[in-house]
Image (cartoon, rainbow, N blue to C red):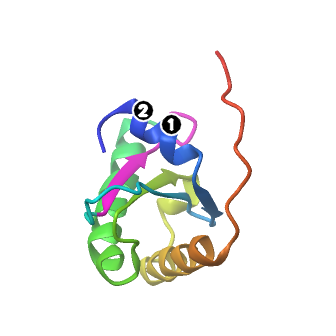
Amino acid sequence: MTKRSDYLAANAGRRAPMPGFVLLVRPRDDADDMMRIGITVTKKVGNAVVRNRIKRRFRALAREVLPRHGWAGADHVLIGRLPATDRDWSLLTADLAKALVKARTAPADAPRPRRRK
């Protein structure tokens, strides 16, 4: 995902917080069955080196877990948290699989108001 509007739309989807990340999942309801992934890490987490390390870990994580547990035709957004930098890889993969199941079974969240700057 590259457009800001896609990230904002995903924010209205289902949310599953985990220790190393927050997962947002939003079905697109179009004819395309492709899973899309978006990754974001804010400056609050750390400097550029830390943020890029987390993004690299999340890309590898998505390649490993999403083909088995992801939703076809949905947007998946991973929002990085600081524990993702040194969290064990097996725990991260288990967390993502658990978050995908949690998001699938949880009722849809009520729409959240957009914050203005």
| Residues at marks 1 and 2, CA–CA distance in whole angstroms | 5 Å
Q: Which residue is mark 1?
A: 8
Find residue 44 and report its horizontal and vertical position in percent: 58, 36
Task: Name above or below for residue 64 compared with residue 35.
Answer: below
Residue at 30% x, 56% y: name it: 56
**Mark 1: few/some/many CA within 10 Å (<14, 14-19, 20+):** few
Give the residue type at disc 2.
Ser
**Amino acid carrying mark 1 in the image:** Leu
Magenta span contains residue 5: no
Q: Position of residue 52 (x, y in %)?
A: 33, 46
Q: Which residue is mark 2?
A: 5
Q: Position of residue 76 (x, y in %)?
A: 42, 58
Q: Is residue 99 above or below residue 48?
A: below
Q: Residue at x 33, y 68 (%)?
A: 62
Work out whether residue 17 or residue 80 is closer to the camera in this orientation and state it.
17
Locate residue 42, reporting x and y percent. Answer: 51, 37
Q: Which residues are magenta?
A: 35-45
Residue placed furthest toward the front: 31
Q: Is residue 27 above or below residue 62?
A: above
Return the residue nearer the eye: 32 or 69. Answer: 32
